[in-house]
Structure formats: C-alpha cells, structure tokens
Amino acid sequence: MSDTPSLTAQDALVALMIAVSASDENIRTSELVKISNMVNHLPVFAEYGDNLSGISSTVFDLLEQEDGLDALFGLIREALPERLYETAYALACDVAAADGNVTEGEGRMLEEIRYELKVDRLHAAAIERGARARHLTL
C-alpha cells in the first residue's frame, strides 16, 4: 500500500463513486456518464482536474487486493472531511441508481459506505429516497 498515492477530497469522492460502480463487477455506461456529469457540474468538483482514469486505476488495484476495500476506505476517510460524508453517500447513491436498478453488489457497497462513513440511518434513507426519485423512468 506504500505506493498507493494519497487522495484529495475530490479524488476520494470519485474513488467512492467508481467503487460503487465496480461493486457488481459490471461497470455500466450510464454509471460512467453519471460520474462524469457529476464531476463536470457539481460545485464540490470545482477546479478538479481530469484524474478519473488515475483514480479508477487506484480503485481497481486496491479492489484486487485482499483487504483492499479496507485500504480504500482508509484512504477515503483520510482525504475526506467529515462534513462531506453525506455528500459522498449521496453521490454513491446516484451512481448506484443511474441505470434504474441497484444491484445486490451495489446495495452491499452502499451499506458498507454507510457504516464506514458513519452516515446516520435516517439521513441515509432520505438520501436513498432522493436518488431513487431522481432516477425513475416513465
């Protein structure tokens, strides 16, 4: 893990979104488009350079290792201010809901994120409900 680069707060948010997308072992185009759109348009990513491929590589490398998920969450908690934990969870929920279906793997990853970032259960339910509402189709 010593050659794993440290992350900025914005990198940590991107890493979490990529981890959710990869959690079901099927990264969908709709999820990648969602991540790209959020990085390009949300205020939390103002002045963020294009490091999506670099962060993706870091996440994939970590997820291939035993205890890699723990290492990833350690990096994320180290880089991300606590005031952005709910923001991180909201972004993760939006990625999971992007294709209109939260898979079992994505659901488990969201549960892990809630635990690791200590997102209050009631707040998490509200965030999840908002993501579901934003991604409904006719």
Image: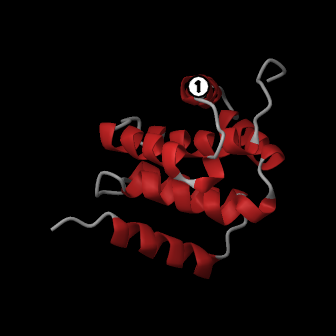
Who is closer to the viewer here, 13 or 116?
Answer: 13
Q: Position of residue 82 (x, y in %)?
A: 79, 61
| Quadrant of the frame with the N terminus | top right
| Quadrant of the frame with the C terminus | bottom left
SS of the residue under disc 1:
helix
Q: Position of residue 14 (x, y in %)?
A: 59, 41
Q: Which residue carries the number 1 mark?
A: 64
Which residue occupies 57% across, 73% down?
A: 124
Q: Position of residue 97 (x, y in %)?
A: 37, 57
Which residue occupies 76% across, 23% down?
A: 4
Q: Decide if residue 18 is in sight here.
A: yes
Amino acid type, label 1: Glu
Which residue occupies 54% across, 24% down?
A: 53
Quarter holding residue 15: top right
Which residue occupies 56% across, 28% down?
A: 56
Question: Residue most toward the top?
Answer: 3
Q: Position of residue 89 (x, y in %)?
A: 59, 60
Q: Is residue 71 above or below residue 83?
A: above
Q: Decide if residue 114 is in sight here.
A: no
- In the drawing, does residue 120 fall left or right of residue 82? left
Q: Is residue 44 above or below residue 69?
A: below
- In the drawing, does residue 90 fall left or right of residue 76? left
Badge 1, how many Cα within 10 Å: few under 14, some, many 20+?
few
